[in-house]
Amino acid sequence: MKITIADSEQEFDITAARRIVATICERPQAVIGLSTGRTTGNIHRLVCDIHDHLDFDVSQTTFFGLDEVTGVDREYAGACYTMLRTEIIDRLGIDDSHFLMLPTRSADFSVDCMHFKNEIKKRGGIDLLILGLGENGHLGFNQPGTPLNNTACTSKMDSALEARIRRETASPDDAELGGVTLGIRDIMHARRIILVAKGFNKAETVCRMLCGPVTPDLPASVLQLHPDCEFLLDAKAASQIDINLLR
Ligand code: GLP
């Protein structure tokens, strides 16, 4: 298990950003999966800052979003589509054909999920997947209790997360929010994963993810079984890890 602990939030952000940049420089046609949220915004902006200075080629790189909020228009500020566009995609000048997202609205999400996964497969599969960590251990919108072998699907939001999204993004009260996400099995097919977590609010979950059993009760625990997953943490998120219990 590879665990990297950054002393500061700045070091955390720059480490993750450098990993993304290095992947693109090594393999310009890389397929890179991104997560949205409080943990990844600065990382995305740093990738753009580095690109402003180094001007490496991103014209062949495909980016996709791990998951999406459903029940709102994708142009809405809280939709992952718009967050990723704002934080990284537009600044890098990525062409629409190289930015894959699940839809926020659909007559049949299962068809869209299939199409999304086929597009990723056609491009050679996932080279690098950056994963945020839910406070309850969710990955994407795969909530606790999700079977560890599920594939891309829609998901109910837990009420705490829904309340937070409503609060932070001022979604219209009448919008019924849900989620659509790559499944855990799809995530495990990524060639390389970096799980990013920062802050004391993630510390207990980080400890259970790394030191506890692999269980659907904590979807992120499945990453213990991935052959190339790096756990990138800041010192706060790492503060409860029990070294003696690491697997
Ligand atoms: C949401 C998103 C996930 C993200 C997670 C962590 O549930 N659907 O993709 O990884 O939150 O968010 P944060 O970094 O804000 O804690």
Image: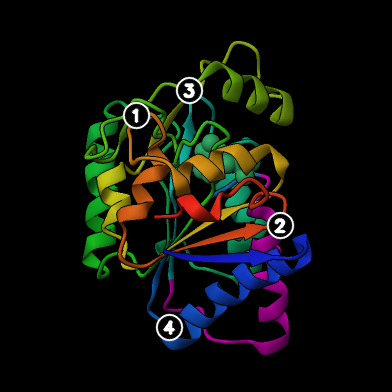
Mark number, residue 157: 3
Query: Is 231 situated above or below 74?
Result: below
Q: Amino acid at mark 4?
A: Pro
Q: Nearer the viewer, mark 4 or mark 2?
A: 2
* SS state under label 4: loop
Side of 208 relative to 102 (left or right): right
Task: Tell me residue 224's x, y (percent).
Answer: 36, 53
Residue 227 in which image quadrant? bottom left
* Dot placed on the residue nearer the N-terminal end, 4 or 2: 4
Determine crowd level at label 3: few under 14, some 14-19, many 20+ residues with C-alpha closer than 10 A. Answer: some
Categorize mark 4 by other alpha carbons within 10 Å: few (<14), some (14-19), many (20+).
Answer: some
Identify the element where label 3 is drawn.
loop
Location of mark 4 (residue): 28
Label 2 residue SS:
loop
Identity, as a three-letter code, of the amino acid under mark 1: Thr
- Give the label on residue 235, or none: 2
**Residue drawn 50% across and 20% down?**
158
Residue sitting at the far top: 174
